[in-house]
Amino acid sequence: MDCNGANQPLPSGTATSTTEKSNGDVPKRRSLRRVRSAPLAEFGPTDINGDAALPRSESIFGRLHQSFKKVAIFVMVYLGLGTICFYIIRNQIKGKKTNGILDAVYFCVVTMTTVGYRDLVPNSDLAKLLACAFVFTGMALVGLVLTKATDYLVEKQEAFVVKALHMHQEVGQLEILKEIKNNRMKYKFYTASILLVVLILTGTIFVSKVENLDLVDAFYCVCSTITTLGYGDKSFTTEGGRIFAVFWILAGTICLAQFFLYIAELNTENRQKQLVKWVLSRKMTNVDLETADLDDDRVVGVAEFVLFKLKEMGKVCQEDISLIMEEFEEQDVDQSRTLTASDIILAQSVETRRA
């Protein structure tokens, strides 16, 4: 049986190592705890000093920052091509115009974010076809921006949010990193919420001052913009307003979309945590014992118990176990249900001969 092999190596390997050290139970528990804590290796000995925690966090952000720069290049290429195209056919676009190049950039951003104020609209077949092409490519690009740029900006602010929430407590860098890791989605949600409020307030005040709208109309314009509703009765009509809109519309619409995405992911994460808590607090029954007893020896070993609980939590399924066991059986050349250095060497030599 596939799962029969799955529950043998861990207990036997652990028992072997602990027997060599001591006959007591304490070393065995420490060995198991060491296995359980293995995923936290990123907070290893270098983090204990405190100084090494910051470079490690920066390396993660550095990798994300590289992809963010690629997305920025794509956005600039999109806006550059769109500006050139719509500037060339500016006479085939009707509506409230200010400056030729500015209107082209503004129209490109409004099309990309699907806001569609209707203050500038295509007025020829060529303009309509270009608008269709740019709206589809723009929506795809916005999706790319959502997964890269916003995550980058939000994660850059997570540490500040954690510090602000624990400002009356002495929290070190290691504690901040662990808190972010354990509640990453929650702090992403908090950060996106703060950014969204800042963008709404900034947009409302700016529109009120520059576009000469009262606060209600300014807030109404802001809300209809970031939700891409775009009624068109209130929009950016001045040069200053459209310069601001080019940057603010992109930031606002993306931030709102990411905000709702974080809500959905946070809800899913909370439900998963509740399921894990219920599984860990539920007592084993005779039926559970029979189900967890994979080798039918009327005894549930450590690995069998771990597999049973992981399957209950939905973190692993039988298909995953079967695939892992296939890999294990390929490596276990002597079929001893344990892996040793000789097994690895023999498996590599067999693969070499096959090649």
Image (cartoon, rainbow, N blue to C red):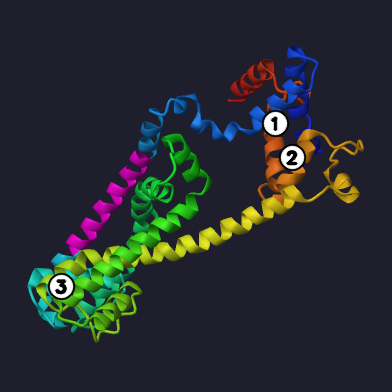
Q: Label 2 belongs to which residue?
A: 306
Left or right of 29, for residue 69: left
Q: How many marks?
A: 3
Left or right of 157, for residue 134: left
Q: Label 3 belongs to which residue?
A: 241
Q: Label 1 belongs to which residue?
A: 328
Q: Residue at left 41%, top 62%? A: 258
The picture quadrant where one finds residue 14 is top right
Outermost residue toward the bottom?
Answer: 233
Q: What secondary structure is the stretch in magenta mostly built from?
A: helix
> Picture coordinates of residue 340 (x, y %)?
69, 18
Task: In the rendered structure, find residue 46 and report the number of the disc placed on it.
Answer: none
Depth check, front residue: 192 or 337: 192
Disc 1 and disc 3: Cα gap in Å?
A: 63 Å
Depth check, front residue: 93 or 351: 93
Q: Is residue 2 visible?
A: no
Outermost residue toward the front?
Answer: 168
Q: Earlier in the sequence, mark 2 or mark 1?
A: 2
Q: Is residue 226 visible?
A: yes
| Mark 3 burial class by Cα count in 10 Å: few <14, some 14-19, many 20+ | some
Write down the region rendered in magenta.
61-81
Amino acid at dot 2 = Val
Disc 3 and disc 2: Cα gap in Å?
A: 60 Å
> Picture coordinates of residue 207 (x, y %)?
20, 75
Amino acid at dot 1 = Phe
Amino acid at dot 3 = Gly
> Picture coordinates of residue 103 (x, y %)?
13, 73
Q: Quadrant of the C terminus?
A: top right
Q: Earlier in the sequence, mark 3 or mark 2?
A: 3
Q: Residue at left 15%, top 78%? A: 211
In this rendering, the answer to whether 302 lies above or below 97 is above
In this rendering, the answer to whether 232 lies above or below 143 is below
